[in-house]
Structure formats: structure tokens, C-alpha cells
Image (cartoon, helix red, strand yellow):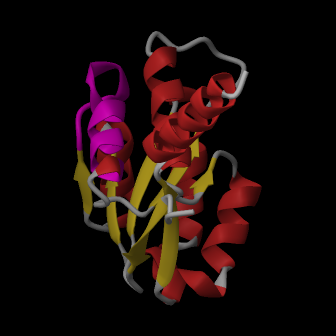
Amino acid sequence: MDKDYKIVKMEKQKSIALIAHDNRKRDIIEWVQNNKDKLSRHFLCGTGTTAKLIAAETDLPVTAFNSGPLGGDQQIGCRIVECKIDFMIFFWDPLASQPHDPDVKALLRIAALYDIPVATNQSTADFLIQSPLMVETYDRKIIDYAKRIHSRTQAYANKEELK
């Protein structure tokens, strides 16, 4: 069978998206402050208010996209698809309904499709930031789902022809 994935090299210096819902902004700011030394070695970006607050309170350079409800989640998702974001820390509020919940779900789906590490809580973020892979190159394996779907369709069609 032909290879149904591609390898994308994640460099030693990662591009990390930082996102937090309103009730979690303080938490992500504190997390960034506690990990400032490690994060300072990487490129940081984030959705609107979160990025601006982190930059102001930590003195780290953080590229700010639009606010999540105003398209920031899609901007980050687009950069994941373009392989310009390698990693995402997203402190989301699982108890609050968000006006842009479909955007959040789409962003998490894109992150899974493009095989990027995602932390949605502090424990996972702590484990990821401590990983030796944070300072190494890493080969992400991005599955070509279109090719897999086509293969399944062909297999089904061939099966039907045999009937």
C-alpha cells in the first residue's frame, strides 16, 4: 500500500499557540509566568486578549491574532494547516458555554488532523513543556485522510463488483 501520510519536521524552536477562555485567562498567564524561561526559547502567538495579557504580564513577545469569537480560532487553525503552528496550549472552560463553540471544536479537530500536541489543562501543559521533545526536532506524521477514504471506497467498490 502506498504511503498515506506525510512527515512534517517540527524544529527545535517551536511555534506555540496560547489560548484561554475568559474564566481561564488568569490560569494561563500564571502558567506562562511559571514556564517563562522555557517558553522564551520558542515563538509564541495567541488569540486576541489572551496574547495581549500574556505579553503585558510576562514581557514575552506574543503575536496576537483576533479574539476567538472574532475569528482568532480560525486564524490559528489556518496556521496549523499551513504547518506554521506546531503546538497549542488551550486552557478552555469546560463548564461555560461559548458563543464560538463550533469554532473551538473546529480548532481542536484541525489540531488532531495535523498531529500537533495540544494541552487543554495545566497538567497536560506541564507534562508537555517538560518533555525532552520540546528542545528537539520531531517528525509529525500527518495522515492523508483523503487517500484513506479513497482506498476504502475503492475496496468497497471492488467488493461490490465481486458479488
Taking depth in this image into account, of 19 and 162 the one nearest to the observer is: 162
Whether residue 89 is visible to the viewer of this picture, yes or no, is yes
Taking depth in this image into account, of 93 and 116 the one nearest to the observer is: 116
Residue at 58% from the left image edge and 27% from the top image edge: 157
Q: In the image as oriented, which residue stretches furthest toward the right?
A: 123
Residue at 64% from the left image edge and 29% from the top image edge: 156
Left or right of residue 8: residue 141? right
Total marks shown come to 0
Q: Main secondary structure of the magenta part?
A: helix
- Measured as percent of width and height from the top left, residue 88 is found at 49, 54
Position of 94 relative to 89 (above/below) = above
**Quarter containing the N terminus:** bottom right
Residue at 69% from the left image edge and 47% from the top image edge: 121
- Measured as percent of width and height from the top left, residue 5 is found at 48, 61
Q: Quadrant of residue 59?
A: bottom left
Asked if the stretch drawn in magenta spans residue 92, the answer is: no
Q: In the image as oriented, which residue stretches furthest toward the front?
A: 162
Residue at 48% from the left image edge and 16% from the top image edge: 102
- Measured as percent of width and height from the top left, residue 52 is found at 29, 46
Taking depth in this image into account, of 80 and 44 the one nearest to the observer is: 80
Asked if the stretch drawn in magenta spans residue 67, the answer is: yes
- Measured as percent of width and height from the top left, residue 56 is found at 31, 55
Position of 66 relative to 86 (above/below) = above
Whether residue 25 is visible to the viewer of this picture, yes or no, is no
Q: Quadrant of residue 92?
A: top right
Left or right of residue 2: residue 93? right
**Quarter containing the C terminus:** top right
* Residue stretch rendered in magenta on the structure: 65-80
Position of 139 relative to 56 (above/below) = below
Taking depth in this image into account, of 133 and 150 the one nearest to the observer is: 150
